[in-house]
Amino acid sequence: MLVGTVIGNVWATRKEENLTGLKYLFVQPELPSGAPILSPFIAVDRIGAGVGDKVMVTTGSSAANIIGDHRLPIDAVIIGIIDSIDVEGGA
C-alpha cells in the first residue's frame, strides 16, 4: 500500500467499457512526513475521495480485482481516506 495526496481529477469520456462509471484521481505518493516520493499516478476512486484528501492506495492485482471475479484493467485503487498519521521515532 501507498499513502498519498489527491492532487487532481481525471476525466475520460471514452474508455474501456468495464471502466464506465468509475472515478479517476491523480495521486501524489508521499512519505508519512508528507514529502513527495515517486511520480503522481492515476487511481480509481470508489469511496468518494477528493482533491486535497490524504489517501491509502493499493496497486497491482489487488486493485484489478476490486469487483469480485471481474478483473479490471487498472493498476491502482484508493482504499481509504486518511484522517491522521501518527509515526513514532520521527520516521
Image (cartoon, grey):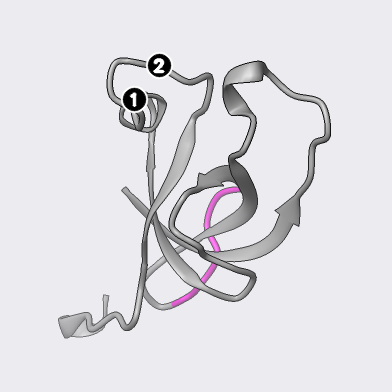
Task: Give x and y (percent) for residue 23.
Answer: 61, 47
Check the picture and name the quadrant holding the C terminus. bottom left
Q: Is residue 80 magenta?
A: no
Q: Is residue 69 left or right of residue 40?
A: left
Residue type indicated by callout 2: Arg
In this rendering, the answer to whether 67 lies above or below 35 is: above
Q: Is residue 29 visible?
A: yes
Q: Residue furthest left?
A: 88
Mark 2 to mark 1: distance in Å? 5 Å
Q: Position of residue 21 (x, y in %)?
A: 62, 38
Which x, y percent locates residue 2? 37, 52
Viewer-side residue, 9 vs 7: 9
On whether residue 35 falls in the magenta region, the answer is: yes
Q: Is residue 40 visible from the viewing direction of this image?
A: no
Q: Which mark is residue 46?
A: none
For the point 34% across and 81% down, which residue is it?
A: 83
> What secondary structure predominates along the stretch shown in magenta?
loop
User: Which residue is identified by label 2?
Assistant: 71
The single residue placed furthest to the right in the displayed view is: 13
**Residue 5 image point, x, y percent:** 54, 67
State the residue at coordinates (47%, 20%). 72
**In front of the other: 91 or 26:** 26
Tag shown at residue 65: 1
Q: Residue at x 40, y 78 (%)?
A: 33
Which element type, helix, strand or loop, lies under badge 1? loop
Residue placed furthest toward the front: 21
Q: Of label 2 and label 1, which has the lower sequence position?
A: 1
Is residue 13 found left or right of 33 in the rendered image?
A: right
Whether pointer 2 and pointer 1 mark residues with C-beta atoms closer than 8 Å, the reply is yes
Q: Which residues are magenta?
A: 34-40
